[in-house]
Amino acid sequence: MEPSPRRRDADRTRRLLLDAALVRFTRDGYAATRLRDVADDAGVNVALVSRYFESKEGLFTACLTKAGDELRRSPGEASLAAAPAAIAAQIVGKAGLERPYQLLLLLRSSGDERAEQIRLGVLRGYSERLAAAAGDPGLLLQAQLVLAATAGLVLLRRSGLEPLAAASEEDLTAPLRDMIEALLKP
């Protein structure tokens, strides 16, 4: 009896490529990221990038979309009272470094016009939902200040600035609550 051919797990391969690309694009930037390195990091053949994402631009767009989906599931869908804990969880990254990498990716410019539209749309949508959660869509600027402060927290944590780098979700929640309450008062 001949051994059966090895079955491919397309979803798993796609997920491995996305996870590897997310780290590479965030750490190295769009221009310096090579598809061969992404495939090597994922432990798959580089041809599979084209199969699942068509191109480097397609892979980057998929990473932005994944990051945006994660961001969409955070504070904007929660009440304003729940926003500080949700933001702290995102900054700390309960699932390891995945969430902070996703937020950092949303801060990087790619040079690709479509990817930029997605990136800015995700950031704009997040701040619009945060302002709406505050009960006043006119607080968009203040909501974007919360987003900017959150992005700064992620950047400084990644740079190793202590005690911020070691701060827990619980450590961050109260100061975030104070900041959000101060900025998003209708």
Image (cartoon, grey):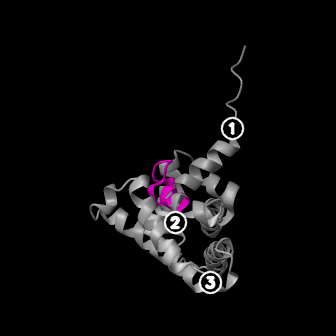
- Where on the picture, by quarter, is residue 161? bottom left
Q: Is residue 93 left or right of residue 8?
A: left
Q: CA distance from mark 3 to mark 1?
A: 49 Å
Looking at the image, residue 110 lies above or below residue 74? below
Stretch in magenta: 86-98
Q: Which residue is mark 1?
A: 8
Residue 95 position, x and y percent, is: 51, 47
Residue 147 position, x and y percent, is: 53, 74
Select label 3 or label 1 by which is in front: 3
Q: Are marks 3 and 1 in contact (CB under 8 Å)?
A: no
Q: Which residue is mark 2?
A: 103
Give the mark nearest the N terminus, 2 or 1: 1
Of 117 and 86, the residue lying toward us: 86
Give the mark nearest the N terminus, 2 or 3: 2
The disc at residue 139 is 3
Q: Is residue 121 left or right of residue 159?
A: right
Q: Quadrant of the C terminus?
A: bottom right
* Residue at image location 68% in from the left, 62% down from the top: 77
Q: CA distance from mark 2 to mark 3?
A: 22 Å
Residue 91 part of the magenta segment = yes
Residue density around tag 2, few if under 14, some if 14–19, many if 20 or more, within 10 Å: many
* Residue at image location 52% in from the left, 44% down from the top: 43
Give the mark nearest the N terminus, 3 or 1: 1
* Residue at image location 33% in from the left, 59% down from the top: 165
